[in-house]
Structure formats: structure tokens, C-alpha cells
């Protein structure tokens, strides 16, 4: 690979070349094409979340789907995320004072969240799953549930 790099003996100004177009110029279209190809090959990208096509088909208002997407991507300023950004906070949940305050804990594992989820028998199968993140939880839901159950899950979250 290094042998293929051409070194010029005369000085010339560096130029940027976008290798994904014939003329070497960047275009949004070429970047979009790259993302479409990556998604088709199952490669992760910034907009993938589990089965992203199924995720966005959830029948719920856009704000609820957007909230779920942010939760799946772990974008909320939970205590654990703040601590990861070097903000000096105690990462323990204030409500149960027992576990780190992660998005999974806030929306699924905390005693207050469980009080909502345990009353609905249609989500009992999720309690038996050992999900390590909210992403895992939603992925299980998308893969093993009906569209009705997914639509019910979204606004409750």
C-alpha cells in the first residue's frame, strides 16, 4: 500500500481529492451513495439502530420515535454519560440509590420504571431477557414482537 504512494520531487501544494467520484470532487450524492451501500452490506453507520428500517416504521408520533432513537443511541445526559464527559457527578440513581443511572436503568430497570412495566402482561417476555443496554431491549422488542406491542411500548417509554 505504501509503495503505491507517489512522492514528487518538486514542491506542489496539497489538494483534497474525494476518491468516491470520478472528478475527485466531494458531493453529498456520493456520500449518500456510500451510506446506502454500507447499510445494504450490514455495516454499522451513524443512523443504524438495530433494524433501522423496522424502527422507523413504529406507528407513533415522530417525537416519540425520535425520543426512542435518542434513547437507543444513549444520547441523553444521564449521570453516567455526564461522568463520561468528565462532569463530576455521583452516577448513582437518586430514586433507588442502588444502581448507576444509565438510560436502561432510567427507562426499564429502576423500581419506578418497573412499576409501570410489570403491570402490563404483554411485556413480561422482556423481563426474562438479560438486556445490557436500551439498544438491546429495543432490538429484542423489534425482533420478537408484534407491531401492536411495539406501538404500545413507544409512548409508554
Image (cartoon, rainbow, N blue to C red):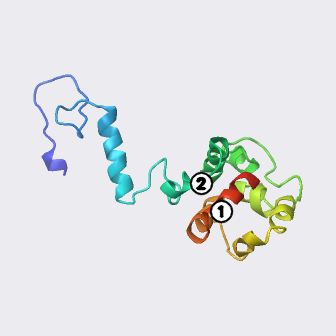
* Residue occupying image coordinates x 67% and y 74%: 129
Regarding mark 2 in the picture, which secondary structure is present there?
loop
61 up-or-down from 112: above or below = above
Marks 1, 2: nearer the viewer: 1
Question: Is residue 49 shown left or right of residue 145?
Answer: left
Expressed as whole percent of the image width and height from the top left, the position of residue 77 reads 71, 43
Q: Nearer the viewer, residue 49 or 99?
A: 49
Q: Which residue is tagged 2? A: 58
**At 62% from the left edge and 53% from the top edge, which residue is drawn?**
72
Label whose residue precedes the other's in the sequence (1 or 2): 2
Q: Can residue 133 be seen at all in this image of the molecule?
A: no
Residue 30 position, x and y percent, is: 29, 38
State which quadrant residue 122 falls in. bottom right
| Total numbered labels | 2
Picture residue at 75% right of the left edge, 74% below the top: 124
Distance (Cα) linking label 1 and label 2? 9 Å
Element on which disc 1 rests: helix
- Dot 2: within a 10 Å radius of its alpha carbon, few (fewer than 14), some, or many (20 or more) residues? many
Q: 34 or 94, which is in the foreground?
A: 34
Give the residue pinned by disc 1.
148
* Residue 137 appears anywhere in the view: yes
For residue 74, above or below residue 51: above
Q: Quadrant of the C terminus?
A: bottom right
Left or right of 3 in this view: 96: right
Residue toward you, 116 or 83: 116
Q: Any mark on residue 104, and which?
A: none
Q: Is residue 78 left or right of residue 4?
A: right
User: Which residue occupies the foreground of this view, 79 or 58?
Assistant: 58
Which residue extends farthest left?
9
Q: Residue at x 19, y 49 (%)?
A: 2
Amino acid at each position: 500500500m505504501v509503495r503505491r504512494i507517489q512522492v514528487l520531487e518538486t514542491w506542489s501544494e496539497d489538494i483534497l481529492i474525494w476518491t468516491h467520484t470520478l472528478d475527485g470532487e466531494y458531493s453529498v450524492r456520493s456520500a449518500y451513495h456510500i451510506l446506502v451501500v454500507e447499510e445494504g452490506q450490514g455495516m454499522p453507520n451513524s443512523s443504524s439502530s438495530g433494524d433501522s428500517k423496522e424502527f422507523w416504521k413504529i406507528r407513533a408520533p415522530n417525537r416519540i420515535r425520535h425520543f426512542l432513537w435518542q434513547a437507543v443511541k444513549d444520547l441523553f445526559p444521564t449521570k453516567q454519560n455526564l461522568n463520561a464527559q468528565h462532569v463530576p457527578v455521583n452516577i448513582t440513581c437518586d430514586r433507588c440509590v442502588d444502581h448507576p443511572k444509565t438510560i436502561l436503568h432510567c427507562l426499564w430497570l429502576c423500581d419506578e420504571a418497573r412499576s409501570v412495566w410489570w403491570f402490563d402482561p404483554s411485556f413480561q417476555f422482556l423481563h426474562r431477557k438479560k438486556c445490557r443496554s436500551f439498544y438491546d431491549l429495543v432490538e429484542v422488542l423489534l425482533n420478537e414482537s408484534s407491531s401492536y406491542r411495539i406501538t404500545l411500548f413507544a409512548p409508554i417509554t
